[in-house]
């Protein structure tokens, strides 16, 4: 099957145009896949959000009807408020924990590899398996892991995921447990890029350890931190598995997130694909704002570095 | 086994605290505290995983009635019973099919697209390139409803095909490949062209042999991604004979069709392959987190 072509032939036969065409042919299958799996559905989703659906096809054009009924529903505002709360809690807990971990592990000499590896392991677990694992930890029975531990200290057994005010922070703790080690690794890479001479020069100028952290370490990871913060907001805004598996959105919709609401519109009994698509568009628009912010921050960072 | 880095010859402090600080008594106690905190971090990270492995040895009776962390006996038959009675091996086999096809598609399609975008660069490639970057930032989960409908309309559901092909359209993998290809010196590609290779031949003979490192990285991500994937597999495979481990696990937990102890053992079975993969390739995985700044 191999074609041997001399230089001249290839110049003659493979003119500019054929070259471009053959390049496009090489990329074509992949482009079709992207179109089918990502770009197409995105466009279809926008169209679908203006229709009602029957089975798996468009039915009637309803204009902004789907959007109106979503905005009118109490469920949506609950889910929106909850999603904001997920984000806020993840900034309180999930944002600072990896930074602290990176700082602390960065100061160790012996066992650094072990600490890094150990804190990274939860990240490789399948999300679903990790979440189901935590159902045993937060079980309200006396055989739940946290209740067993509480009993050692003589504390009464508690219910966890059925507490209105507790459910979102607990879910955030679970996702922090899973993701913090990997994020800390990124910070550690940033920290190791700091020129040690800076610390030494600062010490000669009389800076103690805290001053060095404050004036050298923190500014050095500030850009990285702002980038990762926005990425984290984008991720948390799409939280779905946790409420879906742990609480089914309960108690009383207290852990219902926007993505889970979208999922419920589509696959939760009443099949309302149009409404689900509209919810998807709303979520996308919010995320698009964050994404623009992200590219903004990233560009600024590159300007400074360049 | 644990070290992510090769051990340094002389241990030097690399953080904020420098060697000259460590003589002060306050700093010394500070270091002790730091080590205690690190040990705590490691403990909190590993404890739930270790716990579930041990809890898997409990019988149902023990699991629901005795409030202890550890099992009374390490009775391996609990695991083997769950494995055979719930026919988890079937789901394992299905997951292997899912993973294998996904890895092939991830390598071939994303690799070829990145080759086009990084090296061939035909007229107009920038449009595709920015569309790919756009999908890197846009959440894929949003389009899952229309995607599901398309799959239904094409009667592709109830088998792995859409799952395999979906991993061939990953903006993340394209970016990984692309960064790697862009580091090639242009002269190699030019030389092969002058020697008369077509674009595809250049890819097969020059680019591919040089790309083993990035192929390994993408393959690891693809294995882990396909193994852990659950939303699309659930929509496509639920209720068929092809249910993967994750799909089965979800139906266990959502429909409460199994006992609590079996559920925990199923969790363990779902965790074992990614953990093994991690310890085999931990250096590659953690390095790449650092390089790309993106968690897989």
Image (cartoon, rainbow, N blue to C red):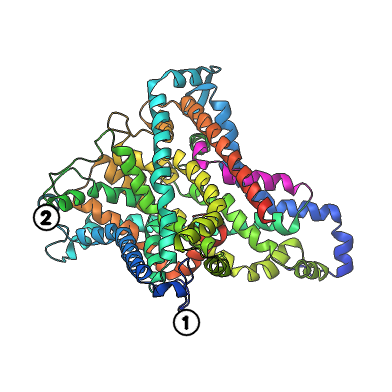
Element on which disc 1 rests: loop
Residue A61 location (% of width, % of height) = 55, 18
The residue under the point 53% across, 30% down is: A281
Q: Which residue is mark 2?
A: B62
Q: Which residues are magenta?
A: B123-143
Query: Who comes first in sequence, dot 1 or dot 2?
Result: 1
Evaluate whether residue B136 shows in this view: yes
Residue A271 location (% of width, % of height) = 41, 27
Q: State left or right for residue A177 relative to residue B101.
A: left
Q: Viewer-proximal residue, B15 or A126?
A: B15
- Whether the magenta-drawn stretch holds residue B129 is answered as yes
Instruction: Say which mark, if any, is on residue B10.
Output: 1
Q: Of helix, strand and loop, which mostly describes the magenta segment?
A: helix
| Alpha carbon separation for disc pair 1 and 2 | 51 Å
Tell me whether the residue at label 1 lies in contact with that at label 2, contact meaning CB atoms closer than 8 angstroms: no
Q: Viewer-proximal residue, A259 or A34?
A: A259
Report the residue that reaches farthest toward the front.
A206
């Amino acid at each position: 099957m191999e074609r041997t072509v001399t230089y001249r032939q290839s110049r003659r036969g493979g003119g500019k145009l054929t070259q471009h065409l053959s390049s496009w042919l090489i990329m074509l299958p992949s482009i079709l896949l992207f179109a089918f799996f990502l770009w197409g559905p995105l466009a279809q989703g926008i169209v679908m959000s203006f229709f009602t659906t029957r089975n798996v096809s468009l039915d009637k054009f309803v204009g902004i009807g789907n959007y109106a009924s979503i905005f009118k529903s109490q469920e949506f505002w609950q889910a929106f408020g909850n999603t904001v709360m997920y984000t806020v809690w993840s900034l309180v807990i999930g944002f600072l924990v990896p930074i602290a971990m990176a700082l602390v592990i960065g100061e160790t000499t012996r066992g650094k590899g072990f600490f890094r590896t150990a804190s990274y392991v939860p990240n490789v677990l399948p999300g679903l398996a990790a979440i189901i694992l935590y159902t045993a930890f937060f079980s309200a029975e006396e055989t739940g892991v946290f209740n067993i531990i509480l009993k050692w200290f003589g504390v009464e057994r508690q219910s966890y995921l059925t507490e209105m005010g507790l459910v979102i922070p607990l879910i955030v703790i679970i996702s922090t447990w899973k993701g913090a080690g990997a994020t800390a690794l990124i910070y550690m890479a940033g920290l190791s890029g700091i020129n040690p001479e800076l610390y030494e020069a600062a010490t000669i100028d009389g800076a103690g350890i805290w001053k060095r952290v404050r004036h050298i370490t923190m500014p050095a990871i500030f850009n990285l931190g702002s980038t990762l913060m926005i990425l984290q907001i984008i991720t948390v805004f799409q939280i779905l598995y946790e409420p879906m598996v742990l609480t089914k959105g309960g108690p009383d919709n207290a852990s219902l997130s926007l993505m889970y609401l979208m999922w419920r519109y589509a696959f939760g009994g009443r099949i309302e694909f149009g409404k689900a698509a509209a919810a998807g568009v709303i979520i996308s628009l919010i995320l698009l704002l964050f994404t623009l912010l992200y590219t903004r921050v990233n560009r600024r960072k590159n300007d400074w570095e360049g | 086994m644990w070290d992510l880095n090769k051990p340094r010859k002389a241990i030097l402090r690399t953080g904020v605290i420098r060697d000259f600080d460590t003589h002060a008594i306050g700093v010394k106690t500070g270091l002790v505290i730091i080590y205690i905190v690190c040990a705590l971090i490691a403990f909190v990270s590993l404890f739930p995983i270790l716990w579930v492995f041990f809890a898997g040895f409990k019988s149902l009776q023990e699991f629901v009635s005795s409030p202890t962390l550890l099992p009374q006996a390490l009775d391996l038959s609990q695991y083997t019973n769950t494995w055979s009675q719930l026919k988890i091996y079937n789901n394992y086999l299905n997951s292997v099919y899912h993973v294998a096809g996904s890895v092939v598609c991830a390598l071939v399609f994303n690799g070829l697209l990145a080759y086009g975008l990084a090296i061939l660069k035909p007229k107009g490639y920038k449009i595709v390139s920015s569309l790919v970057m756009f999908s890197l930032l846009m959440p894929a989960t949003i389009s899952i409803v229309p995607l599901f409908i398309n799959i239904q309309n094409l009667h592709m559901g109830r088998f792995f095909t859409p799952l395999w092909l979906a991993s061939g359209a990953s903006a993340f993998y394209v970016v990984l490949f692309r960064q790697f290809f862009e580091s090639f010196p242009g002269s190699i590609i030019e030389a092969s062209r002058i020697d008369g290779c077509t674009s595809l031949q250049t890819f097969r003979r020059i680019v591919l042999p040089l790309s083993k490192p990035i192929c390994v990285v993408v393959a690891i991500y693809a294995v882990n991604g396909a193994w852990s994937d659950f939303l699309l597999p659930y929509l496509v495979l639920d209720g068929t004979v092809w249910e993967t481990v994750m799909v089965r696990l979800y139906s266990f937990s959502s429909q409460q069709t199994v006992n609590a102890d079996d559920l925990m053992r199923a969790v363990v079975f779902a965790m074992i392959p990614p953990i093994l993969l991690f310890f085999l390739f931990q250096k590659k995985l953690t390095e790449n987190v650092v390089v790309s700044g993106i968690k897989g």
